[in-house]
Image (cartoon, rainbow, N blue to C red):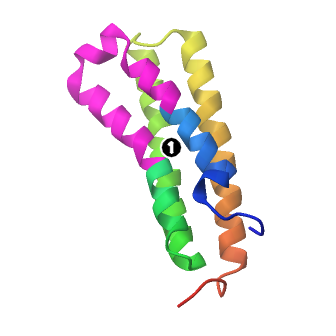
Amino acid sequence: MHGIWKFEDLVAWQLAVKLQQLTDRYCDKPAIRRNFKFRDQLGDAAASAPRNIAEGFGRFYHPDFARFARIAKGSEVEVLNHFMHARDLRYLSEEEFAAGAHAARKALKAVNGLIRCLEATPRFGRR
């Protein structure tokens, strides 16, 4: 993670934000907007990933950061699950679902790489 001075530089955070933005667009669809509980759960899961990556980055200690990155990963998997459910409910078309699933899997790949990096350097950071 040399050369990373702010959380906004992390690819995992950038892709989590893109997933959140796509999710926000989907949450504006009338069918999803009417299902308040579903919309709120989907929106919160999508917002959780970049929020946890940012918070973990602020910890400056790799084991702590890895814990927050794993929470972000769980939120991204939850978003993917919500997209599947939205497709089944016909809230999303097959094309919208495919775009959402692709964005979620791309974000998951990046956060998995971040977790591997953090776990490979557990003594890095201040404590």
Magenta-highlighted stretch: main secondary structure?
Answer: helix
Residue 57 picture quarter = bottom right
Residue 97 lies left or right of residue 31; in this view the side is: right
Task: Give the answer, above or below, for where 15 lies relative to 94.
Answer: below
In the image, residue 3 lies at what x, y percent? 77, 65
Task: Give the answer, above or below, for where 55 lies relative to 59.
Answer: above
Give the extent of the magenta segment. Answer: 21-49
Comparing 22 with 83, the one in front is 22
Q: Mark 1 Cα within 10 Å, few/some/many (few <14, many 20+)?
A: many
Q: Residue drawn 50% across and 29% down?
A: 21
Local SS, label 1: helix
Q: Is residue 70 visible?
A: no
In the picture as drawn, the residue positioned furthest to the front comes out as: 5
Q: Of the residues shown, which amino acid type is indicated by label 1?
A: Val
In the image, residue 120 lies at what x, y percent? 72, 76
In the image, residue 45 lies at what x, y percent? 39, 42
Q: Residue drawn 60% across and 11% down?
A: 95
Comparing 48 with 8, the one in front is 8
Task: Give the answer, above or below, for where 81 lies relative to 99.
Answer: below
- Residue occupied by mark 1: 77
